[in-house]
Amino acid sequence: ETGVTQSPTHLIKTRGQQVTLRCSSQSGHNTVSWYQQALGQGPQFIFQYYREEENGRGNFPPRFSGLQFPNYSSELNVNALELDDSALYLCASSSDTFSYEQYFGPGTRLTVT
Amino acid sequence: KQEVTQIPAALSVPEGENLVLNCSFTDSAIYNLQWFRQDPGKGLTSLLLIQSSQREQTSGRLNASLDKSSGRSTLYIAASQPGDSATYLCAVRGNYGQNFVFGPGTRLSVLP
């Protein structure tokens, strides 16, 4: 059973650019959630995807968008990058949307200059 | 709006001590609570998941308790080791929410 993987590990972008982060969910998991973790803080919920549909969204602007594919892997896209978007981006997968444990990937460290 | 706090923010103890980390949440209508460990710059490792109907969960040297009515959970670590040094985060999921709300974490240092 493979765990949750994310790519790339690190990324440096310039303000105004666009970025795509990728997540492969754990085998057998159909739900992926994305979180943003600023330095020294707890993760903040961005959105969740369940069976290729967005299933809930946190307090993030529309320039944060996502996709989930038939194999349940997922992408997080961020347009018009701002300096405050610099953070660790975590994805988590689970067997359903609600009751089961979430398993987190290692994260993608995004730096916006 | 659910808010989660963790006390203390940082803790330094000598090896071998038993210790307690605290997590408080403002809305007691939770579905479950999960404790995580995070090493510097890394992802989160799940430690224990407590459903709202449960009072505690144990795994090895770790024991987590949940008191929903008072909005509190504690993580007890027995016989601490230097390898336990990390940031410990608690997260709660509400009855009608898909996401976890995280606390800011407790940074633990166990000194040899």
Image (cartoon, rainbow, N blue to C red):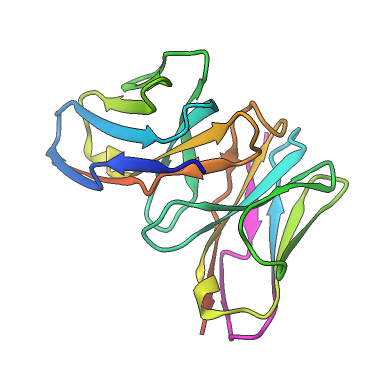
Where residue A111 sits: x, y (%)?
Answer: 51, 75
Q: Does residue B82 show up?
A: yes
**Residue span colored magenta:** A1-19
A68 relative to A4 in the view: left or right: right
State whether residue B21 is above or below residue B101. above
Which image quarter is the C terminus of chain B in? top left
Q: Does residue B111 show up?
A: no
Where residue B56 sits: x, y (%)?
Answer: 41, 15
State whether residue A88 is above or below residue B100. below
Where residue A10 sits: x, y (%)?
Answer: 55, 69
Q: Quadrant of residue B12?
A: top left
Residue drawn at point x = 34 percent, y = 34 percent: B23
Taking depth in this image into account, of B94 and B99 the one nearest to the observer is B94
Residue drawn at point x = 27 percent, y = 43 percent: B85
Where residue A36 sits: x, y (%)?
Answer: 55, 58
Q: Is residue A5 magenta?
A: yes
Taking depth in this image into account, of B68 and A3 the one nearest to the observer is B68
Taking depth in this image into account, of B92 and A76 the one nearest to the observer is B92
State whether residue A95 is above or below residue B5. above
Q: Which residue lies most toward the right here?
A: A70
Residue drawn at point x = 62 percent, y = 79 percent: A81
Q: Is residue A91 magenta?
A: no
B110 relative to B57 in the view: left or right: left
Residue drawn at point x = 85 percent, y = 47 percent: A52
